[in-house]
Each structure stands twice: as structure tokens, then as C-alpha cells.
Amino acid sequence: MNTTAHAPCTSGPIFALQSLVLLVTSAITAWWVSRTPPEKVAAAEGFPLSEADYAIRPLPLPGWAETVIGIGAPVLMVATGALFIRGMATRRIAPLRGLAVLLLVPIALMAGVTWMIATAPVIGANIGLGLAVMAFGSASALLLVGAVITAVLAHRASAPRPPAE
């Protein structure tokens, strides 16, 4: 039986990279899953795409690149998420630090949906973007406060304690 304990890897570059990949791929996945191709939006709303207004102009990506990104991001998100959860379960990732990062995932998901709304073709004002920012902004603030509190608690729990006298 292997009795060597693994030290938590929550302060190194691997944890930071894994957290970053999880958050970025979560945002991209939410964008991809919630989007409708601009041509279909314009056709459904009854206006030519050339007359569309945008709150933010979408990135000029070719269709094949959007497909590769749209398929690759969910695969990376699920793989990274599984490794993240496994790391927490085996204590290679300190549970409180892992929880702090996991509290940020819904913020990334909301950011992806907000980006989709912001880059959607519309005629006139993009009211949906204003509503998304109001709703998602409030929810994100609450999750961010929870993540900060959890990160502070994780830091305090891992801080060396002075020897008892």
C-alpha cells in the first residue's frame, strides 16, 4: 500500500493554469451553446443581416473556426472540470481553494451568455444586453463575494500556525 501523501498543488502554476482553462472554456462553451448564427437571427426577425446593429461587433471568425472552438471548448471544460473535481476529492487541490474557483464558474458561464447577447444582430437598441448585465451583474457580484471569502478562509487555513506555548 502506498502511504506517501500528496501535497496540495493549489499554489503552483498548474493549479492556476487549470483554473484559468476551466473558467475560459466555461465562458466559451456558454457562448457556443446559447448562440444562433447571425444569418438565422436576421432571417427569423425579418431583416437583412447587412442592416443589423450590434452592441459589440462579433469577432470576424470564419465558420470553421467557430465550429472548432465550439466543439473544443466543451471538451476541454469537461476534462478540466473532471480533473479539478478529482483533485479536490483526492486532496491534491485544497477543498476550500477548489471551492473558491468553482464559485467563479457560474460567473464565466454568465459572461459567455452575455457575450452572445452583446454580439447578436438586432435592429435598434439591444435591450437584452441591458437586462443580462443587470441580472448577471448582481448574481456575479454575490458569487464573487463568496469566492473571495472562501479564498480568504483557504489562505487562513493553510497559513502556518505559531507553535503553542
Image (spheres, grey):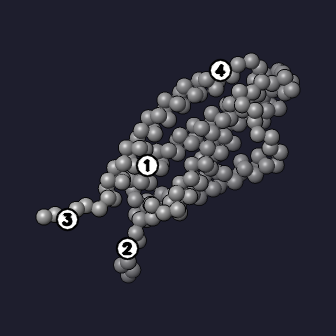
Contact flag, marks 3 and 1 (Cβ < 8 Å): no
Q: Secondary structure at mark 1?
A: helix
* Quadrant of the image occupied by residue 36: top right
Residue at 63 percent of width and 36 percent of height: 113
Query: Which label sits on residue 127?
Result: 4
Q: Secondary structure at mark 4?
A: helix
Disc 3 residue type (three-letter): Pro
Query: Which label sits on residue 163?
Result: 3
Q: Which residue is mark 1?
A: 100
Q: Earlier in the sequence, mark 3 or mark 4?
A: 4
Q: CA distance from mark 3 to mark 4?
A: 59 Å
Q: Residues within 10 Å of mark 3 (few under 14, many from 20)?
A: few
Q: Earlier in the sequence, mark 3 or mark 1?
A: 1
Query: Which label sits on residue 5?
Result: 2
Disc 4 residue type (three-letter): Ile
Residue at 53 percent of width and 63 percent of height: 14
Q: Position of residue 135 (x, y in %)?
A: 53, 27
Q: Residues within 10 Å of mark 4 (few under 14, many from 20)?
A: few
Disc 1 residue type (three-letter): Ala
Q: Which image quadrant: the C terminus?
A: bottom left
Q: Secondary structure at mark 3?
A: loop
